Amino acid sequence: MGKKIHVHCTVDNCQWWAENNLCVAEKILVVSDDFAKKLPNEVDVEQTNQIVDDLGLSPVNECYESCCKTFVPRDKYQRGMGATEYNKVEV
């Protein structure tokens, strides 16, 4: 069995939100913001496989181009720039 992934979510009025800000959905769909504009506002968990097949890949260059706030470009991570270092934001 694969490693269990913990998805943190702060949208507490979602069906899949659970205590300690965890998402308990069986599947999660993350796409680029450009692809998200092409999707309906709501996507049923059963539709995710078909949507992924239809859309294909949706690469981004920066975190802000996606709703995935833990995004790190693969090439930067492979060069030794870990996610913790790369995603630091100066305020």
Image: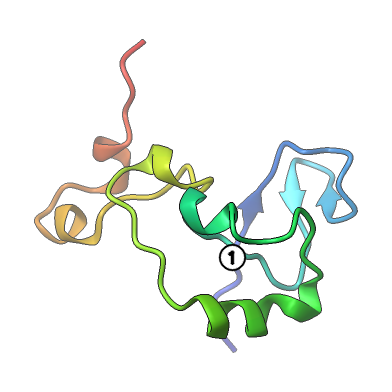
Vertical arrangement, residue 8 with respect to residue 47, above or below: above
Which residue is drawn at the image coordinates 58% and 55% (left, top)?
36
Coordinates of residue 75 in the picture (x, y in percent): 16, 60
Q: In this view of the protein, which residue sits in the foreground, 58 or 9? A: 58
Local secondary structure at mark 1:
loop
Which amino acid type is marked by label 1?
Ile
Q: Circle 1 sits on which residue?
A: 5
Q: Describe residue 8's horizontal placement relative to residue 59 as left or right.
A: right
Coordinates of residue 78 in the picture (x, y in percent): 15, 61
Which residue is drawn at the image coordinates 24% and 48% (left, top)?
82
The extreme top residue here reads 91
Coordinates of residue 19 in the picture (x, y in percent): 84, 44
Q: Describe residue 12's horizontal placement relative to residue 48 as left or right.
A: right
**Could you tell me which quadrant the N terminus lies in?**
bottom right
Which residue is drawn at the image coordinates 59% and 52% (left, top)?
37
Vertical arrangement, residue 57 with respect to residue 85, above or below: below
Vertical arrangement, residue 47 with respect to residue 35, above or below: below
**Could you tell me which quadrant the C terminus lies in?**
top left
Q: Describe residue 22's horizontal placement relative to residue 32 as left or right.
A: right
Q: In this view of the protein, which residue sits in the foreground, 89 or 47? A: 47
The extreme front residue here reads 38
Q: In this view of the protein, which residue sits in the foreground, 1 or 25? A: 25
